Amino acid sequence: MSQPNSILKDIKNKKFAPIYFLSGEEPFFIDQVSKAIESDVLTEDEKGFNQTILYGNDVEMADVLALAKQFPMGAERQVVIVKEAQHLSRSIDQLESYAENPQPSTVLVFNYKGKSLDKRKKLYKTLQKNSVVLETKRIYDNQIPDWIETTAKEMGMNLEAKSKFMMAESLGSDLGRIYNELQKLKILAETGNITPEIIQKNIGISKDYNNFELRNAIETRNAVKAFKIANYFSQNPKDNPLVVTLSILYQTFSNIIVYHTLSDKSQSNVAKELGLHPFFVKDAATAAKNYPLKKATRIISLLRETDVKSKGVGSTGNVSDGDLLNELLFKIFNI
């Protein structure tokens, strides 16, 4: 099974396969390889007659294969890219006969998003012989910070520890969005060292007033800091939606409950059982010390109540999200 980086390296070095079958759960890596092929195999002059983009929901598999068998015009190769190829899943087995003896002057690409080939079938085994098969996996949330750090290093940048966690917390698991923001930072950062201040200035994430800092304030029972952040959130509700904050706090207190049940509280086991980055294990231990099991369980109920109220159920009058968050924090710190 090929990996995105090795595929991209080969494409850059002009080592092309006759078929690229790009599948799986993470669209970013599929798009990354597909865009590299679209950009680098042919020159701009050659693309006019020799590069074809098709879409799986409005093309037949027989037409794709007929086109792949054609010869290029005035170029060494032709490129045929089938985007949204998962719509061809019912007829994808027709690719088998072509994959046995592919046209050497054609680079045929399938973007098979959200699906994977059945490894027991002959098509998969045939593609493994002389084609590039990529099966992408979703990156878990706790792996996002390290992915950000590694990708930044590949771009020639160094992210401070807090910087990568700020980005992960604010941008979520959308790798495409994260990658675009890293590209922006590469242009803007003069030294290549990405500090929280640079992120705050150029990505619009507040260094001191974000969910990362709110969670830390609650875990350490720093009420003054927590209410300051809540006040900032109430003044900037579009950038700090309550639903996101509640989701993060729900995960935080769910982890505290699980932490209390663990007999093995070593860093490696806590990170594994809670699905946390090792960086956060110390914070989890601190939070568990500050919130015994009964309190953490009660806070989970408070979070659910606040979520229901935020949707207009059981609340009286015109209560803002800021009011609800302040009420929640008051109860957490006085429970």
Image (cartoon, rainbow, N blue to C red):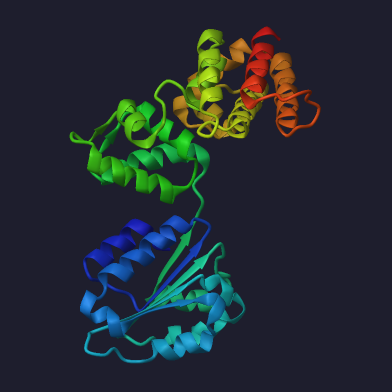
Q: Position of residue 154 (x, y in %)?
A: 27, 46
Residue 160 shown left or right of residue 218 in the figure: left
Q: Is residue 21 above or below residue 168?
A: below
Q: Quadrant of residue 160?
A: top left
Q: Quadrant of the C terminus?
A: top right
Looking at the image, can residue 43 be seen? no
Q: Quadrant of the N terminus?
A: bottom left
Q: Position of residue 271 (x, y in %)?
A: 52, 30
Badge count? 0
Q: Is residue 121 above or below residue 213?
A: below
Identify which residue, 203 or 280, lies in the foreground: 203
The residue lying furthest to the left in this view is 191
Q: Is residue 81 above or below residue 50?
A: above
Q: Position of residue 151 (x, y in %)?
A: 33, 45
Residue 284 shown left or right of residue 186 in the figure: right
Q: Position of residue 40 (x, y in %)?
A: 26, 69
Residue 314 shown left or right of residue 265 in the figure: right
Looking at the image, can residue 325 be seen? yes
Q: Quadrant of residue 31?
A: bottom left
Q: Residue at x 64, y 28 (%)?
A: 250
Q: Is residue 319 above or below residue 239?
A: above
Q: Residue at x 57, y 33 (%)?
A: 241
